Image (spheres, grey):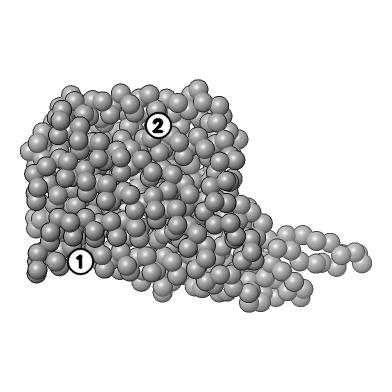
Amino acid sequence: MTAEARVEQAGGLDTLRTPTDHETAPRRTVPLLANLVAALFSRGGNAIALVALPIIALQQTESPLAAGVVGVFSTVPLVIGGALGGVLVDRFGYRASSIVADLASAVTVLAIPLLDATVGLPFGAMLALVFLGGLLDPPGDTAKTSMTPDLAALARWPIERAAGAQSAVERTAMMLGAATAGGLVALIGPMPALVVDAGGFAVSALLVACLIPRRNRILAPVASDGTVSASRPGPGEEPAGDGAGNGGAGAAPESGARGGGFVEGLRFVASSPLLRSIVLLVTLTNAIDAAGLTVLKPLYATEVLGDAALLGFMVGCFAAGALTGSIVFGIVGHRFSGRVMFAATFMIAGTVPYLTMALGAPAPVLLPVLVLSGFAAGAINPMIATAMYALVPDGMRARVFGVTTAGVAATMPLGALLGGACAEAFGVLPTVAGCAVLYLVLASSPLYLRGFSELRASGASG
């Protein structure tokens, strides 16, 4: 008897039906909560690096272009890691991949301040470590994301609630990590801040290893007598979905269902008008945001605001607004049209802060604007995540998420490099003004591109 269905005797007739969550496993919330807290620590560590690394580059070289080069070396791995990481995660299992990726990230991040404090840290060595650390982030994030539907089913949470919690955790991690980085940079400098970053990855790995059980202890099939028996583990003995393509509890598909690798995930994305449209929009806007995060905002904090530590508070204010926006969207977002809300949130989240910086706004003006733009951005990830969970079948999650991670990161290296080059050639304020105009054009595209018309039907509108 498999977990996909069980045979019942009813009036002498055999009937085939899908078992409920109550039948397949007892309710357990600790593994889901552990996965969310692990994501909080790992993504919080990434937020610290996001603030510390550009400041280190500017302090060592005093060149905006050098900061852009650091941005290239931190974003190119996202493309490679997203393209290959999903396939590896599907092959070796979600839990094991998450643990290994987090531990390896901790080592690479810790190596930067250790080398700087001992034998010295040449700029090229720092770039190599940044590249390696960035290469490890997508598999770890993909693994945690891919575990969410199964752990939500185990906890008997609706997938929309789990997706909202996941988005809230991401926003909280950015808020706390960036604010922590700002305080650490102001008090002890950017290099020691990376030690805290490494600690976040180590805690994440420990949580997953200790509190998320292996595949064969998460979901088990129901025998004909109604008892729960041990299931045959999938690859890596990790959770891989419900076997029914709907995010519920069940057994993982056979390993043959995982074949095709990255190309199959790419074909799936290409075949969906909504996924194609989302990936294209996020890919292009991410190029602008990469320039903003790695070059323009650090430059604005140091040159316009006169305090590099304010970068952490700029990022933290945006993340605080985004966290609040995620919560509010989960309550009232379903009342609004999907594509209209999607376009509006993108325009407020992207265009408004760049326009404010282009006008040379001081910190008391800019920080509240960043909270507002973050509030609008808080609705974006839940809409995208809910759409993807509804569209992507079981057994392909890691590959499709890996493809989308690679896709949306594809232009980030170019954006970081062009942002540094333009800031060095034209100055930070004219470059930021150009970003505001580009963001406005792109963010309004859901209003007239046909592919986004499926947002409401897919449930992405909340």
Q: Is residue 122 visible?
A: yes
Q: Is residue 147 visible?
A: no
Q: At label 2, which amino acid type do we have?
A: Thr
338 sits left or right of 186 in the view:
right
Residue 345: numbered disc: 2
Q: Position of residue 410 (x, y in %)?
A: 38, 43
Classify residue 5 as left or right of residue 51.
right
Q: Which mark is residue 111?
A: 1
The one of 23 and 287 positioned closer to us in this rendering: 287
The answer to whether marks 1 and 2 mark residues whose Cβ atoms lie closer than 8 Å is no
How far, Cα to Cα, is label 1 from label 2?
39 Å
Residue under the image location 76 percent in, 66 percent down = 6
Residue 368 location (% of width, % of height)? 23, 34
Percent across and percent down for residue 41 are 32, 60
Quadrant in which residue 431 is drawn: top left
* Kind of residue sitting beneath label 1: Ala
Q: Which label's residue is closer to the chain start, 1 or 2? A: 1
Question: Looking at this view, is 89 or 163 the one in front?
Answer: 89
Of labels 1 and 2, the one closer to you: 1
Question: In the figure, 428 relative to 60: above or below?
Answer: above
User: Looking at the picture, how far across and down is residue 370, in whole percent?
Assistant: 26, 35
Q: Residue at x 44, y 28 (%)?
A: 343
Secondary structure category for the residue under label 1: helix
